[in-house]
Image (spheres, helix red, strand yellow):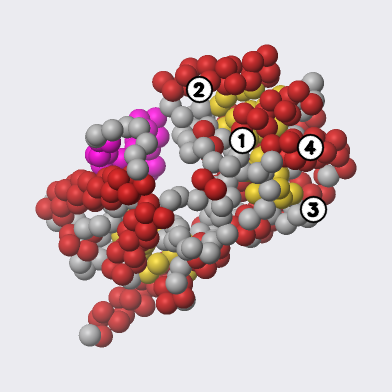
């Protein structure tokens, strides 16, 4: 759509990356402020709410400057989760507003332990979502599971826009076995430790299989934090640490090469499916993922991957070892994972369908507005 002006507003920016036809609007990030350590649950929830307000306030300030230049968007796409959309309607009341609904916490969501946020923080996240969804013209989400977590009166009008994967880029490489045994871990637990005992599983696995190596993928970790994390790995794993590669933010090519070389990819998140899981499946990885409803939408036991409870480090190590022993016989599972990504998430076709869906809803909204 070359005749369309696009502004991309973000708190993060990369000087080495630009997209033709896309203008950047840099948003300020709210300072953390106050105590950086853990707080009592209610105070932690209050801090979340305050940060969301600050984020919304700062976003509104930058968007108001844009409005003063005469720019009024036909369509706004935003997230409901972080607070950025709190004041959008006050600045652009005449725009078609699309909100991406990420999560809605229910008491019966089936998650246990610390992977589940405490009730106060969950309520705050729900409040942010409800505010944005009450103000939008179209609510979208990425998975059926996400949609189904919302109350029926909200979920019934939500549209599922599947995530897109560049299956040409994230494709199987040649000579996977030439790299030996390499197990890649998704690494989310380094940012928010949960029931998945990463260090216990790493030490157990590396002790059990003397030729195995591990890669911990942590793209959210900045270069400045990597030395401290490597030191933590060394302290926890001792002699096994030299067989663990800690991958911080890197080029897309380097990240893909790790996926291609991996004998097994571990997706430990229970409540969501990361894009990394879909990219690993597109690369034809053998995957072992959390046995939860969110993940079962994508991974079918024994067909295109395998599922695991992960709550027992010993049982998880045994499951990983068993899959590594059988990996030569599981080429069909890897091919099925790749096929699922090409059929349901291929960038060229899925992006086109998503775009046509958005534009169709926009056209109908505009037609209703014109008839009033």
Which residue in the structure is indicated by mark 2? 229
Q: Residue 350: x percent and y percent? A: 55, 59
Instruction: Give coordinates of residue 288: x percent, y percent.
Output: 70, 44
Report the residue marked by disc 1.
197
Q: Nearer the viewer, residue 40 or 342?
A: 40
Whether residue 155 is visible, yes or no, is: yes
- Against 150, residue 191 (above or below) is above
Q: Secondary structure under badge 3?
A: loop
Task: Kindly identify which numbered label has been placed on residue 318.
Answer: 4
The reply to whether dot 2 and dot 1 touch (C-beta < 8 Å) is no
What residue sits right under mark 3 in the picture? 302
| Marks 1 and 4, the one that precedes in the sequence | 1
15 inside magenta stretch: yes
Q: Marks 1 and 4, Cα distance to the nearest angstrom?
A: 14 Å
Q: Describe residue 113's horizontal placement relative to residue 28 as left or right.
A: right
Q: Earlier in the sequence, mark 4 or mark 2?
A: 2
Earlier-in-chain disc, 3 versus 2: 2
Whichever of callouts 4 and 3 sits on the residue coming sooner in the sequence is 3
- Please, which residue is most extreme toward the left here? 68
Helix, strand or loop status at disc 4: helix
At x 51%, y 27%, the residue is 248
Going from N to C along the chain, the mark reached first, 2 or 1, is: 1
Looking at the image, do the residues carrying marks 3 and 2 touch, with CB atoms under 8 Å apart?
Answer: no
The tally of labels here is 4
User: Left or right: where does residue 89 sit relative to residue 278?
Assistant: left
- Seen in the picture, residue 153 relative to 122 is either above or below; the reply is below
Asked whether the residues under the numbered discs 4 and 3 touch, taking CB atoms below 8 Å apart as contact, a structural biologist would say no
Q: Give left or right: position of 323 versus 264.
A: right
Which of the 4 image quarters holds residue 122?
bottom left
Magenta segment boundaries in residue numbering: 11-32
Q: Nearer the viewer, mark 2 or mark 1?
A: 1
């Amino acid at each position: 759509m070359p005749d369309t002006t696009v502004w991309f507003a973000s708190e993060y920016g990369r000087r080495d990356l630009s997209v033709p036809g896309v203008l950047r609007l840099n948003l300020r990030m709210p300072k953390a402020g106050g105590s950086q350590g853990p707080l009592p649950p209610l105070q932690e929830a209050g801090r979340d709410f305050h940060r969301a307000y600050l984020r919304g306030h700062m976003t509104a300030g930058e968007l108001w400057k844009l409005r003063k230049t005469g720019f009024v968007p036909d369509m706004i796409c935003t997230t409901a989760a972080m607070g950025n959309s709190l004041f959008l309607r006050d600045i652009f009341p005449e725009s078609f507003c699309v909100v991406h609904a990420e999560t809605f916490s229910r008491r019966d969501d089936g998650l246990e332990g610390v992977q589940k946020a405490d009730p106060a923080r969950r309520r705050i996240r729900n409040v942010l979502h409800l505010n944005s969804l009450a103000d939008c013209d179209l609510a979208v989400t990425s998975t059926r599971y996400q949609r189904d977590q919302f109350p029926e009166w909200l979920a019934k009008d939500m549209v599922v826009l599947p995530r897109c994967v560049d299956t040409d880029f994230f494709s199987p490489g040649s000579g996977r076995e030439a790299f030996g045994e390499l197990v890649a871990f998704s690494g989310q637990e380094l940012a928010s430790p949960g029931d998945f005992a990463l260090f216990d599983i790493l030490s157990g696995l590396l002790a059990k299989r003397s030729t195995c190596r591990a890669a911990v993928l942590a793209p959210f970790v900045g270069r400045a934090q990597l030395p401290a994390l490597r030191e933590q790995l060394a302290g926890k794993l001792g002699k096994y640490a030299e067989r663990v590669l800690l991958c911080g933010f890197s080029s897309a090519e380097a990240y893909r090469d790790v996926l291609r070389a991996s004998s097994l990819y571990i997706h430990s998140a229970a409540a969501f499916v990361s894009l990394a899981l879909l990219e690993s499946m597109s690369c034809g990885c053998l995957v072992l993922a959390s046995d939860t409803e969110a993940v079962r939408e994508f991974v079918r036991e024994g067909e295109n991957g395998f599922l695991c409870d992960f709550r027992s480090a010993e049982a998880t190590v045994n499951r990983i070892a068993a899959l590594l022993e059988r990996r030569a016989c599981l080429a069909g599972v890897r091919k099925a994972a790749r096929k699922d990504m090409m059929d349901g998430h291929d960038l060229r076709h899925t992006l086109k369908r998503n775009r046509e869906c958005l534009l169709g809803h926009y056209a109908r909204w505009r037609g209703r507005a014109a008839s009033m």
